[in-house]
Image: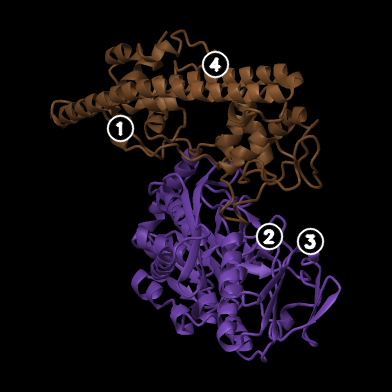
Amino acid sequence: MKLNRRVFVGTGMAAATTLSAPMIHAASHGKPKVVVVGGGAGGATAARYIAKDSQGEIDVTLVEPSRSYYTCFFSNLYIGGFRELDSIEHSYGTLASDYGINVVHDWATGVDRDAKTVSLAGGASVPYDRLVLSPGIDFVEGAVAGWDLSAQNAMPHAYKGGSQTELLKAQVEAMPEGGTYVMVAPPNPYRCPPGPYERISMVAHVLKASNPTAKIIIADPKENFSKQGLFEEGWQKYYPGMITRIGPDFGGGNVTVDPAAMSVDIDGELIQADVVNVIPAQKAGMICDAAGLTDGNWAPVSGHTMQSRMDENIHILGDSTNQGDMPKSGFSANSQAKVAAMAVRGALTGSRVFPAKFSNTCWSLIDTDDGVKVGATYEATDEKIAKVDGFVSQTGEDAALRQATYEESIGWYEGITSDMFG
Amino acid sequence: MTNTFGIFASVLGGSGLVLGLAYGWMSRDYRDQEIAALTERLSQMEDSRAALAAKADQAVAFEARLEDLEQALATARDEAEAARQAAAAPEVAATERVSDPVAEDVTSARLDFGDPAKGAEVFAQCQSCHQVGQGAEDRIGPHLNGIFGRRAGAHDGFNYSDDMQMMGADGLAWNRDTLDAYLENPKALVSRTRMNFAGLKDAGDRADILAYLRQFSASPQDIPEAAPTAQAPEVELAPEVLEIVGDTDYGEYLSSECKTCHQQDGSDQGIPAITHWPTEDFVVAMHAYKQEIRPHPVMQMMASRLSDEEIAALAAYFAQLE
């Protein structure tokens, strides 16, 4: 499926014209319908932008099971004691009241692509003209030997915001003196490339104050990771001797866990642990697979519009997608949502469509007032979203710059959450 | 200064001779050798004296050039001011460039990477020395996994030429642009590189090979700071600058300076052809030199004293040359 913008906008206008005719007879029924599945950085932003910019011309329904949304970004800062849990909790009230979005708290369980309907766990079926899927991640079954979702209370992943994050924080705080924290890090690609290593920094920050003889072990299947030099410099500076990372050369990719015994086997060496944070390999949110939109673990999309490569009536955003160079992050999903919102409105109401441009920045906190960042700009090509230019914090930066970087991240959090939830 | 040096040299030479005589008195057999050695040292010192004198001359020349440049800068400033005033005058109508993004082709990204499949074929000629991909090892040349973003001469365990190591220490890192320059003419970038390869003259071949090799370095999706896979525009220019319509007559007048090196008939012998370029590319290139984003020192100097209007005029002139 190759879409050319001219053809695309053309059909959009044609659709708008044909739709305007029956509107005379049945105004509300004639409105084009957009259903958005998933109320995170991608879905909430897309719903809000489509509703806001179409000024009532498009009927928007947002399907999201949770009434309270806990952002995954900044959840590490909650673990480190830098944020309260309620500061990363958001509701959908404003999207409903101020933007007229029909927010439905239910699970989307399937998509009938021929009938263009989404089925919900509660039994309802919701029709759409365009569907936006932004379901985040699910875990690959059997990715870590000995672990499955039933073990998530003993060995939390804490890779979706909310109760898992609370559980992990409580476990870290309850560690016995001199205890051991093990992280099983995920293989590429996964949500939030620097996330596991920011988490290590935050756990170390807590332990340094309350339990300084405790140990942190990372079993990592990857040779390298994002901001590696910056993290390793920070760990050496703030938490010397506390953190050991076992890379693939030393069997970091060969891990078996036993949730009942709270033990981790790393390449034949058995470690008795007090906290085991298992972050398994990831895949597109389940609904993508259920709708037949995945190729392998992820859902391929066109960077020009974020349309699925398998169904032009469906746009997919954020972590679930296979789009090219953008990292799986909340910032990326938010950026992609705006491109998709523009394309959806263009198709349904004939509004102007501009060339897709994307950006992303990931901030990470290493210790108090020591923030680092990595960011880039991207453009859409026919093959993928391609990185154009970027920047990354440098090792050896002075304290004032690092503090400014951290403060910038707080500003960004306020900005993106208002952009998502109104 | 030259005098002082002469005295210094003769005093040294004199004392050397005295020493030589004394030595000869003690052991006559070595006297001839000793004299030969001393004579050689004397001639070496004379050489270095000559070199120093040349440097002094050069310093004078540099000073003169600096003055020239300062003068040129002042002229350019005046001209720019005049141009600014001219631009502010209401009768100069801004020529509109109607830009409707919807009408533009969707492939707006400037992808200076080529086709990786073609690149794999071009890479065949590199394979006698370089391996890439899973299980690649160092052979005559280093393996090329992870080459993008790596510092030159910095891959552990490979025995690089001194020049390559020096370039790495000086800050040369491999990205799309540096690899392109190196592939075009290895010895132009790293003088005594051990890579025995004349270079790939076809820019398309280089773009293809770089697209192929890029696949074996870190993905920006996993490591966001990894090297880009698309090319950023070289300079961000204000739309007003790009909208200036060049005066070809003025361009012809200005072009005489360019034609000292760049040939009017568009032939390309060591110095690139600059005829028939899209005017926007020409304008961007010249501003990239002016802002010292492009490295070539002569072009930086030439561009530094050209106003926006003059660059537009040159672009317009060279674009329409027969």
Of callouts 4 and 1, the N-terminal one: 1
Vertical order, B223 against A77 (above or below):
above
Chain at numbered mark 2: A
What residue is rendered at 78% in x and 39% in y? B131
Q: Looking at the picture, do discs 3 and 4 lie on one chain? A: no
* Structural distance between the alpha carbons of marks 4 and 1: 30 Å
Q: Residues within 10 Å of mark 2 (few under 14, many from 20)?
A: some
Q: Which mark is residue A188?
A: 2
Look at the numbered discs 4 and 1 and tell me whether their residues touch, using CB distance below 8 Å. no
Q: Colour of chain A?
A: purple
Judging from the image, the colouring scheme is by chain
Marks 4 and 2: same chain? Answer: no
Relative depth, front residue between B160 and A306? B160
**Label 3: how many residues lie within 10 Å, few (<14), some (14-19) or many (20+)?**
few
Protein chain holding label 4 = B
Question: Residue B317: horizontal and vertical position, in percent?
Answer: 35, 15
**Residue B37 in view here:** yes
Chain to which the residue tagged by mark 1 belongs = B
Residue that protrudes farthest toward the right in the picture: A268
Real-space CA distance between mark 1 and mark 2, rounded to the nearest whole angstrom: 44 Å
Q: Which residue is mark 1?
A: B241
Amino acid identity at mark 3? Asp
Query: Circle 4 is placed at which residue position?
Result: B270
Hue used for the chain lettered B:
brown
Q: Chain of mark 3?
A: A
Residue A249 is labelled as 3
Q: Residues within 10 Å of mark 1 (few under 14, many from 20)?
A: some
Disc 2 residue type? Asn
Say what secondary structure mark 2 lies in.
loop
Please state which amino acid type lies under the numbered disc 4. Answer: Gly
User: Please, what is the three-letter code of the amino acid marked with disc 1?
Assistant: Val
Q: CA distance from mark 4 to mark 2?
A: 45 Å
